[in-house]
Image (tube, helix red, strand yellow):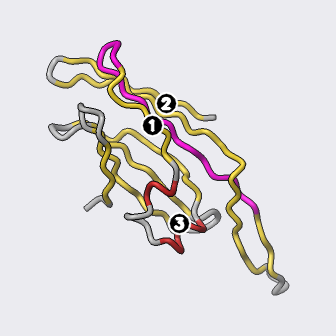
Amino acid sequence: MLKRDTVVFNDGQRYHCYIAINPTRYKVISHTVNEDGLDVDEVYYDNIVNVSIFKGGTQIFKRDLHKKDYAKQVKSDFLEKAVFNDMNFKEDDAQGFHFIASLCVPNGASCYLVDNLVSDKGEIHFKLPE
């Protein structure tokens, strides 16, 4: 398990953002061909990411995020092969708190980065960065 926390000050208010990346037993199979031309299946395990935001001592957001939550932003054939790799706090602005989720194909160079916008009212929206 990987944990991160970030303290943000916005309009004189103190916010505390927590990210916990939790490994699962959900398998992602990566098909490759070795140098002898044989098919090789490698097994990777997916993650669930928990994001929590507190304003002072009051929790304004808490949710477990799964890679299936990004089905509208990421092509289904890619998502099937990908692992929910990471989540990082990016910034806060007038819209809310931005976190960047990375969904990557193991041992590949392909990743989708998805902006997770959490409003101060506890609503979350997903979009691809521009």
Tell me: 44 left or right of 52: right
State the separation of the CA atoms marked 2 and 3: 25 Å
State the separation of the CA atoms marked 1 and 2: 15 Å
Residue marked by disc 2: 4
* Membership of 54 in magenta stretch: yes
Q: Nearer the viewer, residue 94 or 70?
A: 70
Q: In the figure, 41 relative to 62: above or below? A: below
For the residue labelled by badge 2, is the local secondary structure a helix, a strand or a loop?
strand
Could you say which quadrant of the image residue 9 lies in? top left
Q: Residues within 10 Å of mark 2 (few under 14, many from 20)?
A: few
Mark 1 or 3 closer to N-term? 1
Q: Residue at x 15, y 37 (%)?
A: 94
For the residue labelled by badge 1, is the local secondary structure a helix, a strand or a loop?
strand
Number of the front mark, 1 or 2: 1
Mark 1 or 2 closer to N-term? 2
Disc 3 marks a residue whose amino acid type is Leu
Q: Residue furthest top?
A: 57
Residue 124: percent from the left, percent from the top?
A: 32, 44
Q: Residues within 10 Å of mark 1 (few under 14, many from 20)?
A: few
Could you say which quadrant of the image residue 117 lies in? top left
For the residue labelled by badge 3, is the local secondary structure a helix, a strand or a loop?
helix
Mark 2 or 3 closer to N-term? 2
Residue marked by disc 1: 63
Residue range corresponding to the magenta coloring: 43-58
Q: Nearer the viewer, residue 65 or 109?
A: 65
Quadrant containing the N terminus in the rendered view: top right
Disc 2 marks a residue whose amino acid type is Arg
Q: In the figure, 13 relative to 79: above or below? A: above
Tell me: 116 left or right of 33: left
Disc 1 marks a residue whose amino acid type is Arg
Q: CB of mark 2 within 8 Å of CB of mark 3? A: no
Residue marked by disc 3: 79
